[in-house]
Amino acid sequence: MSTRMFKARRGRTALTILGMGIGIGAILFLVALGYGLQNLLLESITTSDSLVTLDVSGNPTEGVRLSRDKISEISQINGVSEVIPANELRAQLKYQETISEATAVVTKPQFIKLDGKKMASGAALSDNKREGMVMSSAFYKIFGQSAEEMLGKKVTFSLFLPKIENGKEKSEKTDITQEFEIVGFVENEDLIFYVNSAALDDKLSSTDYSRIKVKCADAASLEEVKNKLSGEGMSVSSLSDTVKEVNRLFMGVKGILAFFGLIALLVSAIGMFNTMTVTLLERTKEIGIMKAIGASERDVLLMFIIESSIMGFLGGFVGIILGILTGSAVNGIINVIAWRMGGQAIALFSYPLWFLAFILAFAALIGFITGVGPARRASSIDPLEAFRSR
C-alpha cells in the first residue's frame, strides 16, 4: 500500500524525488569539494612517515648545537626510531653554462621522505649512487628545460661553509670537484637541491648540522619525544601540528559549504511535505474506506510514514548520483584546462564511503520527518467525515 503511489502518481512522485535529489546532490557536491581540497593540501605537504617525524634545530643563543655527539645522544632517547641529520648550506651551482645561487641540503637519502617531499619525476637519493642529486622543480624555469631533458645531466657546485673568525661567523667557499648527476626532482618552488652526505663527509666532518629529522616509533611517542627535546633547549616542530591546523580549518570550510547545501535541501523538504499533504487530500475517501473495514490508526500512520521515508531514501540515492556526476564533470573540465596549460590532473572531489552512507540515512530521515505531519493527520481522519468529503 505504501508503494502504490509510486505507480499511481508517477510524474509527481518522480519530480518530488528529483527535487529531493537536487538538494542532497548540492550538499554532496559542496562537501565533497571540501574533502577534495583538504586531501589535495594534505597530500602536497605530507607523507605517512612525516606525520611521526619531528623537525629539530639547534639554538645558538642558548649554546645548543647539533653536533655529532648530540645526534648520537638523541638517537638513544626512548621512542626515537631514526635520526637523520642535514646540513643546509648556501651554494653556487653550475649547470652547463649557467650558474645559479641555491640552497644545498647535504643529508641521507631518507631525509626527503621524512621532510614530506614527494618525487615529481626521476628517482630519489640512494646509497647505491652517492653522486646523485635531487633538485627542486623550480630549476626547470631557471635553466629553461624540462625534467626529462635535465635528468642524467652533470652538475658541479660550490658550498659556503660557516667558519668562526674572531668570534664572528663567516662563510668560506669550498669547491666540490666531483660531478653530481641529476637523478630526480621534487615539487618545490625554492631553489634547493639535495645530495647524499656520504659523498661529502670528508668536507663537512667538522661542521655542525643545521637541523635533523627525528622519526618516532609511533604517534603515541611523538609528543613525549617533542617535549623532551624542547626541554633541552632545542627548537622543535612537527608536521602533524600543521595537519591538525589544516583539518581544523577545513572542518569549518566544510561546515560552511554544507550550510549552503542545506538551504537547497530545505527547499526540497518543503516540496516533499507539500506532496505528502496533497496526497493526503486526494486519498481522504480511500483512508475512510480503509478505516471502515478495519484498518487501525497505526496502519494508516505507518503507510504514510513508510511512503515518505522511501521517497526520501530514493531522493538521497538520486542525489548521490547527481552529486558524483556533477563533481566528475567539473573535475574533468578543470583537468582539461590544467592539461592544456601544462599542469597536472588532480582529484578535486572526494567521496568518503561513510559520508555517502550518512547521506542516504539523512535523506531517509528527512523523508520520515516531512511525512510525520501528514501521516498523523491521515491516521486521525474520521471515516464518516472522509465519506462526506469531495
Image (cartoon, rainbow, N blue to C red):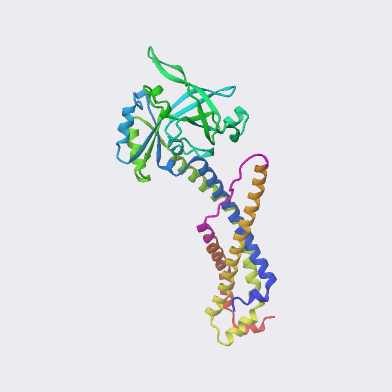
Which residues are drawn in magenta? 340-357
Mark yes or no: residue 66 visible: yes
User: What residue appears at the point 68 percent right and 42 percent down from the top-left corner?
Assistant: 340
Outermost residue toward the bottom in this view? 293
Mark yes or no: residue 264 visible: no
Task: Give the overall secondary structure of the magenta segment.
Answer: loop
Q: Position of residue 119 (x, y in %)?
A: 52, 39
Q: Quadrant of the N terminus?
A: bottom right
Q: Quadrant of the C terminus?
A: bottom right
User: What residue appears at the point 55 percent right and 63 percent down from the top-left corner?
Assistant: 360
Residue 114, located in which quarter of the rendered image?
top left
* 105 vs 384: above or below: above
Tell whether position 78 is magenta.
Answer: no
* 106 vs 162: above or below: below
* 106 vs 251: above or below: above
Q: Where is residue 65 in the image (x, y as percent from the top left)?
A: 35, 25
Residue 318, located in which quarter of the rendered image?
bottom right
Residue 286, located in which quarter of the rendered image?
bottom right
Q: Give whichever of 16, 263 is nearer the camera.
A: 16
Q: Give whichever of 11, 94 is nearer the camera.
A: 94
Q: Position of residue 308 (x, y in %)?
A: 59, 70
Q: Where is residue 77 in the image (x, y as percent from the top left)?
A: 30, 37
Tell whether position 352 is magenta.
Answer: yes
